[in-house]
Amino acid sequence: MAILDADKEGFLRSETTLIQTIGRAARNLRGKAILYADKKTGSMERALAETSRRRDIQLEFNEKNNIKPQSIKKEVKDIMEGARVNKRASKNRPQDYSKDLKFRIKESNPDEISKSINKLEEQMYKYANQTEFEKAAYCRDKIKELKRKLIEV
């Protein structure tokens, strides 16, 4: 992590902020905090002294308890995972937003299904732009359902 203009006193370069930022970098096993400055300020000196003190305490604790620092091993999750509609959870809230759509979904033949899919996509993006995410998710799920029907036909 690089801190530019670390010698400029102010809210984002205060002793407390520098300690927090340096501490955040220290949470990663190979994390480093690099402070770029023309001169060493009082805030920088105090922050560096405090982080050094904390590091010494942590190293002593690790040595005493035979702890070897390791990076966290956690799988990367899909950020859209939480946006998907859960079928079990959806029973608790109204899910049928078809009455809110500006058109009727027609499923009689492949051409009508394709037109409905296109209209649903437009409506989905409109809902998303209006931050009506449940309605957008309903449209997305309906699109998937119609695409499956289109494949079957």
Image (spheres, rainbow, N blue to C red):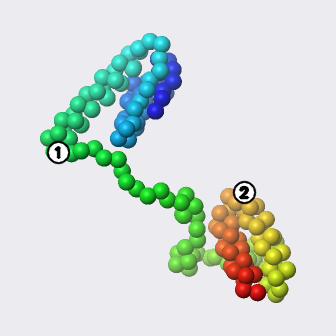
Label 2 Cα neighbours within 10 Å, binned few <14 / some 14-19 / many ≥20:
few
Front residue of 109/90: it is 109
Q: Quadrant of the C terminus?
A: bottom right
Residue 20's quadrant in the figure?
top left
For discs 1 and 2, the disc positioned in front in the rendered view: 1
Q: Is residue 142 visible?
A: no
Residue 4 point in image, percent of width and height: 51, 24
In the picture provided, is 59 more to the left or to the right than 148? left
Task: Name the residue: 81% across, 76% down.
Answer: 114
Task: Name the residue: 72% across, 86% down.
Answer: 152
Residue 54's quadrant in the figure?
top left
Front residue of 36/13: it is 36
Q: Amino acid at mark 2?
A: Asn
Residue matched to label 2: 129
Front residue of 92/141: it is 141
Residue 4 in the image: above or below residue 149: above
Residue matched to label 1: 66
Residue 77 in the image: above or below residue 111: above
Task: Name the residue: 72% across, 56% down.
Answer: 129
Which one is earlier in the sequence, the residue at label 1 or at label 2? Answer: 1
Residue 65 point in image, percent of width and height: 16, 45
In the structure shown, which secondary structural element does the residue marked by tag 1 occupy?
loop
